[in-house]
Image (spheres, grey):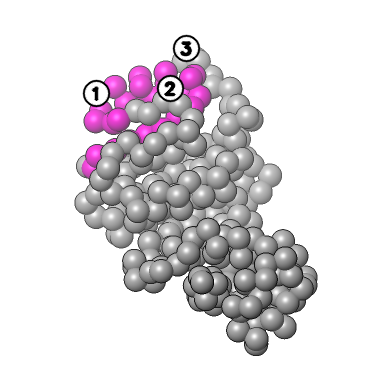
Amino acid sequence: MSSQKIYQHKKQFGQHFLLDASAIQKTSLALSEVWPTGAIWEVGPGDGALTSALLELKRELYVSEIDRDLQERLTRTFAGKSIHWMFGDFLQQSPPTENQLALVGNFPYNISTEIVFKLLNHREQFPVMVGMFQKEVAQRICAKHGSKTYGITSVLTQAFYQTELLFTLPPEAFDPAPKVDSAVIRLLRRPEEDVANLPLDQFRILVKTAFNQRRKTLKNALAGLPLALNSMPPAFLSLRAEQLSVNQFMDAARAMTP
């Protein structure tokens, strides 16, 4: 019997290690085909299965891990490998370089939405993201207007990134098996001209206010934002938030600028 310590997964870190070798290779390929040469930042390496695949791409590789027990295992497993370890809480870490980075990982599901919003806050450094999410979260990020899953996260993400749901995985592809299905998505940063002259603060306020009362028409949902009401095309006011496309929200926010 092996004397190696059996790892006890920690619920507080949302740990579900990916076992499916095909999914690991597909995730690595989904990254490399749109990001052929640049540096990579992996979040939540778990037992290092995806890390091994990323090392084969022969890039500058940064890896964030918060779990101290995993830190010890990872440094032993990858001893001598060219990896920049960033032990600590990813949400509290600054980008490790001023160069462009691709963000990738089997993201801990309990902080996956926060990871997306951190990506948006540092989007000037992140042209690409490929990540594993709970399926429902992945669908929400990629949802198109008119669908029930289309909401705040959909609009704020798609204003800056093209989104694509690549493939889904059942619970048994992980250890321990989560109680939900999972999905890998890819985000590609939109051209700068797409977001030119977008007033970010007003855009966020408009989107959040519109969806906070998503069953109401925009005329009623935006009653507390007179500038938005006065700037909104009259044809939009009889619609609900889920009926406006991302670009229509962006145009409405631009029209709010005095």
Residue at the location (22% across, 42% down)?
58
Is 125 within the magenta? no
Distance from disc 1 to disc 2, alpha carbons, whole Å, reads 15 Å
- Pick the front one: 6 or 244: 244
Label 1 or label 2, whichever comes before in sequence order = 2
Residue, disc 2: 71
Q: Looking at the picture, how far across and down is residue 189, in whole percent?
A: 38, 61
Q: Residue 63 occupies which quadrant of the picture?
A: top left
Specify the label residue 173 is tagged with: none
- Vertical order, 236 against 10 (above or below): below
SS state under label 2: helix
Disc 3 to disc 2: CB gap under 8 Å: no
Q: In this view, does 104 lie to the left or right of 221?
A: left
Residue at the location (69% across, 81% down)?
237
Residue, disc 1: 80
- Pick the front one: 78 or 120: 120
Residue 143 in view: yes
Q: Looking at the picture, how far across and down is residue 110, in whole percent?
A: 61, 40
* Residues in magenta, as a range: 59-84
SS state under label 1: loop
Kindly identify the amino acid type of the residue bearing the numbered disc 3. Answer: Ser
Kindly identify the amino acid type of the residue bearing the numbered disc 2. Answer: Gln
- Vertical order, 244 against 59 (above or below): below
**Mark 3 packing: few (<14 Cα in 10 Å), some, or many (20+)?**
few
Is 60 within the magenta? yes
SS state under label 3: loop
Residue, disc 3: 3
- Pick the front one: 135 or 128: 128
Kindly identify the amino acid type of the residue bearing the numbered disc 1. Answer: Gly
